[in-house]
Each structure stands twice: as C-alpha cells, then as structure tokens.
Image (cartoon, rainbow, N blue to C red):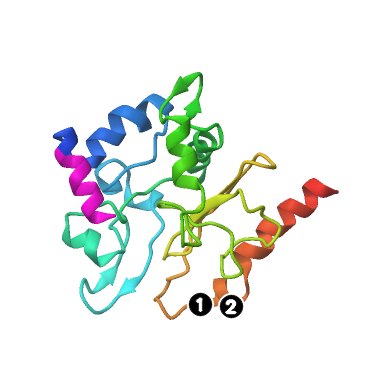
Amino acid sequence: MILLQMAIDSLNKKNIYKYLKYNIYKPMGLKTMCYKPLNYFSKNRIIPTEDEEYWRQQVLVGNVHDPSSAILGQIAGNAGLFSNAFDLATLGQMWLNKGTYGGKRYIKKSTIEKFTGFQKNSHRGLGFNKPTRKTIISNKAPKESFGHTGFTGTCIWIDPVNDIVFVFLSNRIHPNQKNWKINRLKIRQKIHTIIYDAIKN
C-alpha cells in the first residue's frame, strides 16, 4: 500500500492527501477526515492511542500509530488517516452506492466491484477484507460484504445485500498493544450481530 501510494502520487504530481482532500473529502463534505489532524483540530478532540514507551516515548494523540507511516511523515498509503464515525460512514455509503454520493460519481462502479470482490487464490479483496471465519465481524455478514479492520481496533464494514454501513471506532491499544480485550471478548462481532438481529426482528 505504501508503494502503491507513491506510484499514485507520481501519476497525480501531488501527495495522496492533497488529491483526496480536493477530489473526495471536501466535495463529499467530510470535515474531519484528514492526515495530521493536529493541523486542523485541538488535541482535546482527538482520542489518544498507545502510551508508546519504546520509540516516541509519549502518549500518541493525533499522531499516526503505525511506525512506517510515522517515518514517512504521517501521510502514507497504509496508515495515518483520521476521521470521526459520521464521516467514515459517509465514505462507506459512497462505496455502498457503487461509487456515487449526493448525485456525484467519485469512483467508477467497475472499480468498486473489482476492489470489493474476492481475488483469485485469496480470501481478500484488493485493499478490503472479505468475510471469513477469522474476520472480526459478525458471522451473519454475507459473502458480498467487505470492509477494513484497523490495528488500533477500528472497523468499517459494508454490506451491499442488506444496505448496512457498520462503523466501529475504538482504542484497542490503550494503554498499550498488550490490551487484547476487544478481541478476546469479541466486542466488534457481538455489536455487529446485534445490528443484524435487530433488522431481522
């Protein structure tokens, strides 16, 4: 994903954030989706991630947790994007709409279908997870669904069969990476299942 982002930057002759900001985020009204959020928001609006004691030796607030992205200036193809749940759900709705939102097309329908379908000899899509026994989502999500689960405990999952955009923002790695409660207790799976049960009822 880092190399892909660098290739896209070369083609666009601008970094990925400038491209996304002016071609997707601003036109879609995504006011919190950004890299380097401390440039736009006060610290008290940003949830801390890890109390990182090895390299940066501080509680990370508004700085990307991923070390590779941090070294690359916090703007990278693999990590560094911040958002609130509403904006993330709006982006997910655009994917659910096969690339359109508010009457405007942002991504070709064929591109959405290519990236969200199963890839040959893989259980994943191109840049998206697909449902498997190991996926951190409800086992009631259909095979057509797709999404992403982040290292820090975040999750967005799109279900085009039932028209569901599921967003779960959390902080699994606070105070540190040894905090596995969210996984051990299957919190994301349980909440996602409650949504399916509520719709069925």
Residue 42, percent across and down? 32, 46
Q: What element carries label 1?
A: loop
Q: Do the residues labelled 1 and 2 touch (CB within 8 Å)?
A: yes
Question: Measured from the top left, where is residue 3 in percent x and y?
Answer: 21, 54
Which residue is disc 2 drawn over?
184
Relative to 6, is 52 above or below? below
- Location of residue 89 in the rendering, given as x and y in whole percent from the top left corner: 53, 41
In the image, taking residue 33 as reference, residue 144 lies left or right, namely right
**Residue 2 magenta-highlighted:** yes
For residue 55, say whether it is visible.
Answer: yes
Q: What stretch is highlighted in magenta?
A: 1-10
Distance Cα–Cα, label 1 vs label 2 = 6 Å
Q: Determine whether 4 is above or below 30 in the image.
A: below
The single residue placed furthest to the top in the displayed view is 103
What amino acid is labelled 2 in the image? Arg
Give the residue displayed 39% in from the left and 34% down from the top. 31
